[in-house]
Image (cartoon, coloured by chain):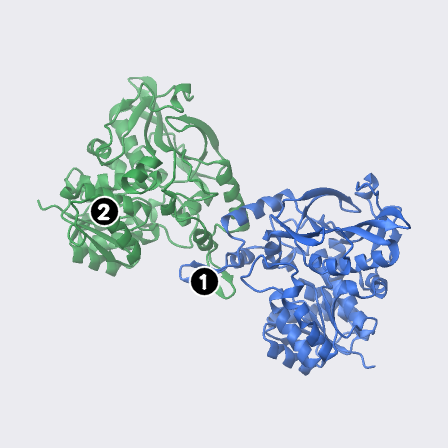
Chain colours: A green, B blue
């Protein structure tokens, strides 16, 4: 079988990480194409990839192409032009439907890391995947083509962790708490770690989580708990709506509760509160001296570009799944997680850990497709696939993972915080 | 002498108050013309004036005219068209130079309530009046025409209070503290009481105050004191740059310190701090998806229109001058002040007290010119004129004023707060 050509759409922070990682695994792909709306960004990313990978030749092993990724015809033409076998969509979620449809038309495999969104639409009803993705499943079936939805870290690796837990660690799953804590410090007054548009919107929306067989909706920041995680230590985390909650209940119908929790610092919450109360976190355009503009666009324009945060970003992130259930008739609670160091990410690929933890799993998933390890010939959410080969390759691409047992009473052991990986952690493999 | 026609430029909150007050004193003017960029605003204000003043006929006693007030030729044409003898400039300070020059050209008297500003220019050096106003004094001399600068409340009435104190209450002035506290509640999360552009800019700028014979510059909100004022009670006030500080040192060179203090609540400061730190209080345009826009314009667009705050606004404002010096060889400290009730203002003219306290003095000043009480035949700041006839007429136009002696040790008597007017207050006259 000829190695498939990889087309990466999007040259933001995550796109850059994916480009570096694809280059490190260039032997698995025929060629690598980077596409984005902005030529300058493409050039910068491609040049950096070449600089860090002496074996890679620009214009040969890696090519750049400008594209309007919201235009299906343009994307389809590009797929044909670069003869892409795998399309990795790392553009804004507003582009997802155009890129999916281009893959259906051309028969290329499709990967993404976030659920599709429409501009100027807020508080979409659950499950989100039912709006744009799942209705296209028959089209992928017909095209005999793979679509793997949501394979960044969260959604993505956390879904895989759930599949792994069900396969190896627990006989039955009672509850899943996905916990995402960024214990890092970017040294700015306020910044979002990825596109402010996506980040502030998802935080602002009503929280949807799964409980007792149905989606429940609550105001944002209205459910809070304190966790004590490996490496990053003790943090307040808040229940938040997140993509993975919209597919996991289908794969784990026995879970009484599936919830996503994000850590927020005092400063972040204060700034967010002000922006929200002023109406500045809105994607609905207002008139400003004759010009129609969404307030959020202005906020995005004044906030630091997430890509610029990488240099000098210190500290770590910890993202994992606190999964409770039973094993051999006894209660068991496991925490499956990864940690990632901002400074190390910057040293390796010039990015911060938030971009890194999204881009690395995306390339690990592209490797799964390229190597034929995943080949469902239909559309799937990633938890529907075999987690084992993916979790075997992910550390080699750059992110290790671990499992630790936690007290079944729901508490966090004192030893877990502020030191690396609890002593009862069963290790994945070291970073390649 | 024929009664002069009055042209009011600006149909915002202050313009509306001025229109109402001019209508109440219609017998002092030949005719009243309202001009603004926006036809709809003009119509609304004019209709409301007619509704509240049955003797006034729209199109006869009061006419409306659209004008681009930044265009000198347009303003001059309008002055000629309505044969204005007095032009009251209540438009944005960006229009001041065009309107002044139109008055010089046509020989109409000029009144304003705020120092001229240029868009996209911040932290202008002191004294501000030396930039655009004072250099035009010879032109007003040549035109044999009156220009009275800064006759809202602050600047304006507070300058008059200083002149009054020097004339009647103190032999020598040591220091002047102008204190402005809005003890009202508009019931919104955050709002500015007049144009957010002007308000947030003036608060954001470095504070310039007068001390020991020179202008001193300090960061905003870096000097704070607690006052206990009549009616509004105890408040924290912060040293702030303000127009009147840029003319008063010329009229009161013996004062060792002249400073302006504004009350700010905890919420206001928190919101302001966030907006400032994010770079949203900037009049320097940034690029937002190909459009150049000043962040402050977007903030203005999402904030409540100050005119909409009036309904339901409760509480009072207190603005006055704490003036210290000597009388008959002994230390004396007086507080000359007015208070104003938001609810009463709304009942009378449909406005809140901040607009009211600016519009009323402006019309009182127009009356001074119309009646020949003020006729300097040159450009003056208002403290250069005789304060007595103005302070005699202001209560009849709608704002009372009082004088109280304060302890010379700088303290505030307990009795001053939370009750109306200290017992030692020497009263002005009641509202007409």
State which chain disc 2 sits on: A
**Mark 1 or mark 2: which is in front?**
2
- From the viewer's side, name the closer residue of A149 and A263: A263
Q: Quadrant of residue A373?
A: top left
Q: Do tags 1 and 2 sit on the same chain?
A: no
Q: Which residue is drawn at 67% across and 68% down?
A: B133
Q: Is residue A219 visible from the viewing direction of this image? A: no
Q: Where is residue A241 in the image (x, y as percent from the top left)?
A: 41, 40
Q: Residue at x 40, y 62 (%)?
A: B290
| Quarter occupied by the N terminus of chain B | bottom right
- Left or right of B432? Residue A71 is left
- From the viewer's side, name the closer residue of A249 and B58: B58
Q: Where is residue B403 in the image (x, y as percent from the top left)?
A: 85, 52
Q: What element carries label 2?
A: helix
State which chain disc 1 sits on: B
Q: How crowded is mark 2: few (under 14 residues within 10 Å), some or many (20 or more)?
A: few
Q: Is mark 1 on a helix, strand or loop?
A: strand
According to the image, label 1 marks what residue?
B292
Q: Which residue is drawn at 59% across and 75% down?
A: B71
Q: Where residue A51 is drawn, which disc sits there?
A: 2
- Left or right of A173? Residue A105 is left
Cα separation, mark 1 vs mark 2, equals: 35 Å
């Amino acid at each position: 079988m000829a190695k498939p050509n990889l087309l990466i759409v999007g040259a933001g922070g995550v796109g850059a990480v994916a480009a570096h990682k694809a280059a490190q695994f260039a032997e698995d792909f025929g060629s690598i194409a980077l596409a984005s709306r902005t030529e300058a960004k493409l050039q910068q990313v491609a040049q950096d990839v070449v600089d860090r990978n002496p074996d890679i030749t620009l214009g040969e092993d890696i090519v750049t192409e400008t594209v309007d990724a919201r235009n299906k015809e343009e994307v389809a033409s590009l797929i044909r032009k670069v003869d892409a076998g795998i399309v990795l969509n790392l553009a804004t979620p507003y582009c997802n439907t155009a890129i999916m449809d281009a893959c259906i038309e051309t028969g290329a495999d499709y990967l993404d890391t976030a659920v599709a969104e429409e501009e100027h639409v807020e508080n979409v009803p659950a499950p989100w995947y039912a709006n744009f993705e799942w209705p296209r499943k028959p089209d992928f079936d017909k095209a005999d083509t793979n679509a793997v939805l949501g394979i960044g870290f969260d959604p993505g690796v956390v879904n895989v962790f759930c599949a792994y837990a069900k396969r190896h660690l627990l006989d039955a799953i009672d509850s899943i708490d996905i916990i995402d804590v960024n214990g890092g410090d970017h040294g700015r007054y306020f910044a979002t770690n990825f596109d402010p548009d996506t980040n502030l919107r998802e935080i602002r929306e009503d929280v949807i989580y799964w409980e007792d067989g149905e989606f429940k909706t609550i105001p944002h920041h209205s459910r809070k708990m304190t966790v004590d995680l490996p490496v990053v230590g003790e943090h307040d985390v808040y229940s938040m709506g997140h993509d993975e909650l919209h597919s996991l209940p289908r794969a784990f119908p026995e879970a009484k509760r599936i919830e996503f929790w994000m850590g927020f610092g005092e400063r972040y919450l204060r700034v967010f509160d002000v922006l929200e109360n002023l109406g500045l976190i809105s994607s609905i355009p207002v008139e400003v001296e004759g010009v129609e503009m969404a307030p959020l666009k202005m906020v995005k324009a004044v906030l630091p570009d997430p890509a610029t945060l990488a240099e000098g970003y210190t500290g770590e992130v910890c993202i994992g799944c606190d999964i409770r259930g039973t094993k051999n008739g006894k209660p068991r609670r496991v925490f499956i997680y990864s940690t990632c160091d901002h400074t190390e990410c910057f040293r390796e690929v010039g990015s911060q850990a938030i971009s890194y933890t999204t881009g690395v799993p995306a390339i690990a998933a592209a490797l799964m497709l390229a190597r034929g390890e995943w080949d469902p010939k239909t559309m799937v959410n990633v938890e529907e696939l075999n987690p084992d080969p993916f979790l075997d390759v992910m550390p080699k691409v750059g992110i290790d993972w671990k499992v630790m047992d936690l007290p079944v009473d729901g508490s966090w052991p004192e030893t877990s915080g502020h030191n690396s990986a609890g002593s009862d952690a069963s290790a994945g493999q070291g970073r390649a």
